[in-house]
């Protein structure tokens, strides 16, 4: 089968993630997530059995329910011929165990499938972790597009915009509180 | 002071004076048989690291290193960099002073929080509402350090006269004398002066248990330095207390030569007339010949055209504009003071020439008793006025004009009732309110009575 790097196909594949990947009983969530990762690695990289690093990562995996759900979506996403490449193992590992848990602190797992922008962000983040470019795109173009979609960057901008507002609110509140109290200081004032 | 505006006593003595263990003298002043009916408590709240800052400021201010014609102070560049990088109001502005527009009282009045540096810890925020003698009342924010630096500023005025404030916890170093209808009064201590007493008293007899107590209390505590406005000093003179202050410092309004001579003669001490602003405290001291000498090296003066953002040629008269200060909660860059003068620099010391600050205007009731214009300003803070002018005719009748953003007939009526309360019987009060922009100073006091 031809390795598909066409964006629409990748988005389509992700969106077709079966709901079973999300709807897992919480008490089974961790176990099933680990099993899906192990299964994915067995399919993509045949020498999984000897991968001590992955085994260590799996044994230490302890994240929130939302992160387990997102990781299971990712195991669905990576399960396609494009990623049958031993050179991509580090990238996929990094996405599953580092980048996706970070993003999942701000994005609900189902949003990766329901929201067009988040779906594209997921695909682009996964590809960037694997250093894979979409057909016809340069590295700069890929980065620009990801920057435009990035949840982390968006939050950072919001935070930067909100910080002065929050500070202003805090000062106003402190002024109001202290004006009414002895802190409305008159020491040394005629 | 309106009860609703009066801050409530909410701290413990330990919070007021974290570094003073012996509060005996404080209690003695508060509980003295002749003491006024103190209505408030106040402390400098200095912690050890803050006290160190105040002491460091005291050393710096003594250097008297100002600037020369055609140059700026050495601290300017660092100060502008700090302002533009940490103070929201100045963010994205230039690091070069000449590129900055002037700012007005209105800018601070509308959004004081925009002037608070990101470096400030809001736990240290203190608020003071101005009396509004030169403009609409406003909130000025500051911290315990900039607040306590008032005393080193005072010391730097006294130093050239060979006067030093004593350090001991068994004497009163400073008494702030008022004569107002109502004002906050307290007995306090100064951590910077090793626990010396600081008093704020109101000479209005209604604030004392017995009339004679005013004189007895002052004589018993015999403050080293008295500060106050000319009205308060005039009342003090009439009281004829047997006290020997080392100096008297008049502020808030211009001190007339006549009153100064009377004070110097009776109290046998130098009487200093200082120019100060609520926004940055003491600025300059009258030095004779119509000149005021700069006292704080961290304040930079410029003279601007009154209506346009144009710097006046050297030596020409215009509006005094100030940059600098030591308050991180209100750093000033090109702040228009609303006061007018020209400037000259002699031997590296700047002088404000023919400073036209606030003249003392007395208003009278029909029985001849006077009203301090600060009482009028305070009463007007209850109304949403942008500014106002008040004039008393020779027959004592009063005309008041208020500027406000929305006209409200009921407000005019309430202002009239408030002024009638202040002026008492047999004085007619005419009040009008308008939405026009004030053409003169935002607050103007005038009188035909000498």
Image (tube, rainbow, N blue to C red):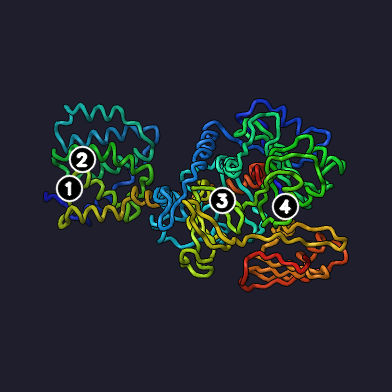
Could you say where residue A114 lies in the image, as x and y percent from the top left? Answer: 35, 53
Rendered view: B185 above or below B130: above
Same subunit under labels 2 and 1?
yes
Label 1 Cα crowd, 10 Å radius (few <14 / some 14-19 / many 20+): some
Label 3 crowding class (10 Å Cα cut-off): few <14, some 14-19, many 20+?
Answer: many
Q: Nearer the viewer, residue A36 or A164?
A: A164
Q: Which residue is mark 3?
A: B280
| Mark-to-mark CA distance, 2 and 3 | 59 Å
Q: Which residue is mark 4?
A: B261
Q: Label 1 marks which chain's residue? A: A
Outermost residue on the left side: it is: A2
Callout count:
4
Q: Position of residue B2 (x, y in %)?
A: 75, 52
Q: Give the Cα distance between marks 2 and 1.
A: 10 Å
Please determine whether, in this image, residue A11 is positioned above or below residue B59: below
- Residue at the spot x=18%, y=34% of the render? A42
Is the C-beta separation of discs 2 and 1 under 8 Å? yes
Name the residue that disc number 1 marks.
A132
Could you tell me which secondary element the residue under label 4 belongs to? helix
A50 or A186, nearer to the observer: A186
Label located before the other in sequence (2 or 1): 2
């Amino acid at each position: 089968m031809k390795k598909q790097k066409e964006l629409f196909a990748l988005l389509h594949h992700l969106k077709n993630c079966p709901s079973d990947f999300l709807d897992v009983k919480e008490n089974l969530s961790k176990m099933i997530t680990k099993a899906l990762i192990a299964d994915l690695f067995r399919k993509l990289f045949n020498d999984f059995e000897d991968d001590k690093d992955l085994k260590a990562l799996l044994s230490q995996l302890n994240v929130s329910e939302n992160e387990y759900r997102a990781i299971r979506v990712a195991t669905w996403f990576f399960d396609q011929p494009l990623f049958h490449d031993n050179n991509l193992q580090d990238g996929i590992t990094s996405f599953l165990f580092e980048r996706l848990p970070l993003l999942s602190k701000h994005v609900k797992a189902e949003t990766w499938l329901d929201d067009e922008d988040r779906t594209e962000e997921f695909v682009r983040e996964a590809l960037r972790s694997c250093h894979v470019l979409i057909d016809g795109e340069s590295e700069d173009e890929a980065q620009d597009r990801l920057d435009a979609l990035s949840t982390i960057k968006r939050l950072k901008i919001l935070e930067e915009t909100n910080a002065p507002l929050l500070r202003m609110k805090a000062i106003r509140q402190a002024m109001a509180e202290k004006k009414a109290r002895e802190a409305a200081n008159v020491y040394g004032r005629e | 002071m309106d009860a609703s505006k009066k801050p409530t006593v909410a701290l413990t003595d330990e919070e007021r004076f974290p570094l003073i263990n012996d509060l005996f003298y404080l209690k003695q002043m508060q509980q003295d048989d002749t003491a006024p009916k103190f209505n408030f408590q106040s402390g400098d709240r200095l912690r050890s690291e803050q006290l160190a800052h105040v002491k460091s400021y005291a050393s710096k201010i003594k250097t008297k290193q100002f600037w020369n014609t055609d140059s700026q102070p050495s601290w300017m560049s660092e100060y502008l960099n700090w302002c533009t990088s940490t103070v929201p109001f100045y963010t994205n502005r230039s690091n070069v002073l000449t590129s900055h527009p002037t700012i007005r009282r209105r800018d601070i009045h509308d959004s004081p929080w925009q002037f608070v540096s990101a470096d400030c810890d809001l736990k240290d925020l203190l608020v003071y509402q101005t009396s509004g003698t030169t403009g609409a009342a406003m909130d000025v924010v500051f911290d315990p350090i900039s607040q306590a630096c008032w005393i080193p500023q005072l010391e730097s005025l006294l130093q050239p006269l060979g006067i030093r404030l004593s350090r001991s916890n068994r004497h009163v170093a400073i008494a702030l004398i008022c004569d107002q209808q109502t004002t906050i009064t307290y007995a306090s201590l100064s951590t910077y002066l090793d626990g010396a007493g600081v008093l704020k008293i109101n000479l209005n007899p209604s604030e004392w248990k017995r009339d004679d107590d005013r004189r007895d209390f002052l004589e018993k505590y015999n403050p080293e330095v008295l500060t106050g406005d000319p009205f308060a000093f005039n009342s003090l003179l009439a009281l004829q207390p047997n006290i020997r202050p080392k100096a008297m410092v008049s502020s808030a309004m211009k001190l007339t030569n006549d009153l100064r001579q009377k004070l110097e003669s009776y109290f046998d001490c130098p009487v200093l007339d200082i120019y100060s602003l609520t926004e940055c405290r003491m600025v300059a001291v009258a030095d004779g010949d119509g000149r005021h000498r700069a006292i704080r090296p961290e304040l930079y003066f410029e003279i601007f055209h009154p209506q346009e953002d144009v710097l006046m040629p050297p030596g020409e008269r215009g509006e005094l504009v100030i940059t600098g200060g030591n308050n991180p909660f209100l750093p000033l860059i090109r702040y228009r003071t609303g006061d007018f003068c020209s400037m000259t620099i002699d031997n590296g010391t700047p002088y404000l020439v023919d400073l036209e600050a606030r003249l003392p205007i007395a208003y009278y009731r029909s029985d001849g008793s006077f009203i301090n214009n600060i009482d009028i300003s305070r009463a007007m803070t209850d109304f949403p006025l942008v500014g106002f002018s008040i004039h008393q005719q020779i027959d004592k009748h009063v005309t008041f004009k208020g500027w406000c953003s929305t006209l409200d007939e009921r407000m005019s009526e309430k202002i009239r009732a408030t002024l009638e309360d202040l002026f008492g019987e047999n004085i007619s009060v005419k009040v009008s309110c308008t939405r026009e922009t004030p053409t003169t100073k935002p607050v103007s006091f005038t009188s035909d009575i000498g």
